[in-house]
Amino acid sequence: MATAAVLTAAGSGTRLGLPGPKALVELAGVPLVVHAARRLAASGVVLSVVVTVPPGRASGFRALLGGPVRPGIGVPVTVVEGGGSRQASVAAGLAALGDDVDVVLVHDAARALASPALIRAVEAAVRAGHRAVVPGLPVADTIKQVGAAVDGAAPVVATVPRATMRAVQTPQGFDRALLDAAHAAGADRAADEATAATDDAGLVEALGEQVWVVDGEESAMKITTTRDLAVAELLARP
Ligand SMILES: Nc1ccn([C@@H]2O[C@H](COP(=O)(O)OP(=O)(O)OP(=O)(O)O)[C@@H](O)[C@H]2O)c(=O)n1
Ligand SMILES: C[C@](O)(CO)[C@H](O)COP(=O)(O)O
């Protein structure tokens, strides 16, 4: 039995506003997807990685990541084409996992600096019997639930108790059978970004199964905007 990772890198990075896929944007001279793959391998618990890449870009990503054990990554990497939503991309990655895999970590290349320690903590929680585990951080802002905006202002419906909220990150760890079942049950949502699950834990919740939160970390931030990239550059400095 083995732990593998599905590393999502099939997004376009529209909000970053740079040419080419976001996963190839460099941080300290190294593409985001390579940072993320190296950290998964450095955790010591992830024995193989499936990377989902934009349709039509597989050969370029294979040249960057491929080979049985790519130098600098340290575990075998398989490259597959992703889909039109993150959910569809993860489903494509799951289909490429080996038969020996019983625990899966789903991780965003956009969270390139998530530490090996966080990756180990999520995996350990799954191995300890929590079948669906996500890292999360407390939120600093007051959170309001709002209705539809009218003339540029949205009515507040409720103030959500902040102490019970967590901003959820990746890697998210799962018992493989549970994650496969969750994706199968939610497959009809995957084609459209408007209906697709925004994370894998959401699909598990929709099955009625318990999801657990462990402590996240600031360095697992998602690089979405140019400001995020600038912050990540600072974090990536030795
Ligand atoms: N169809 C998609 C969409 C997203 N992703 C991946 O999911 C992660 C989180 O997505 P996000 O940060 O939103 O990346 P993009 O979709 O690339 O960004 P944008 O929405 O700005 O285009 C990223 O690692 C991205 O590559 C994916 O594998 N397949
Ligand atoms: C999976 C995720 O990173 C957890 O916070 C997040 O939901 C991805 O969202 P995105 O809109 O695809 O960036």
Image (spheres, grey):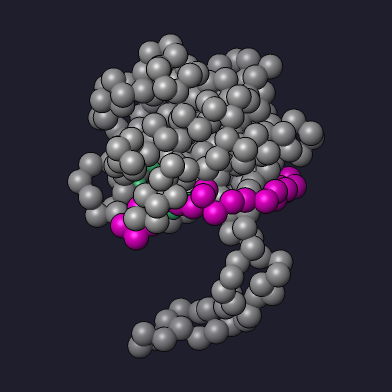
Q: Position of residue 180 (x, y in %)?
A: 61, 32
Queried whether the magenta region covers residue 88, the answer comes back as no
Q: Give the residue at x 30% y 37%.
A: 29
Residue 33 found in image quarter: top left
Q: Which of these two is toward me, 9 or 223?
A: 223
- The x and y percentages for residue 54 are 31, 35
Residue under the point 40% across and 52% down: 234
Q: Looking at the figure, which quarter contains the N terminus?
A: top right
Q: Compared with residue 214, is residue 167 higher up or lower down, i.e. above or below?
A: below
Q: Quadrant of residue 64?
A: top left
The residue lying furthest to the top in this view is 68
143 relative position to 148: left or right:
right
Q: How many marks?
A: 0
Asked whether, in this view, residue 212 is left or right of residue 166, the answer is right
Question: What x and y, as percent, mark residue 168?
Answer: 59, 54
Image: magenta residue range: 208-229
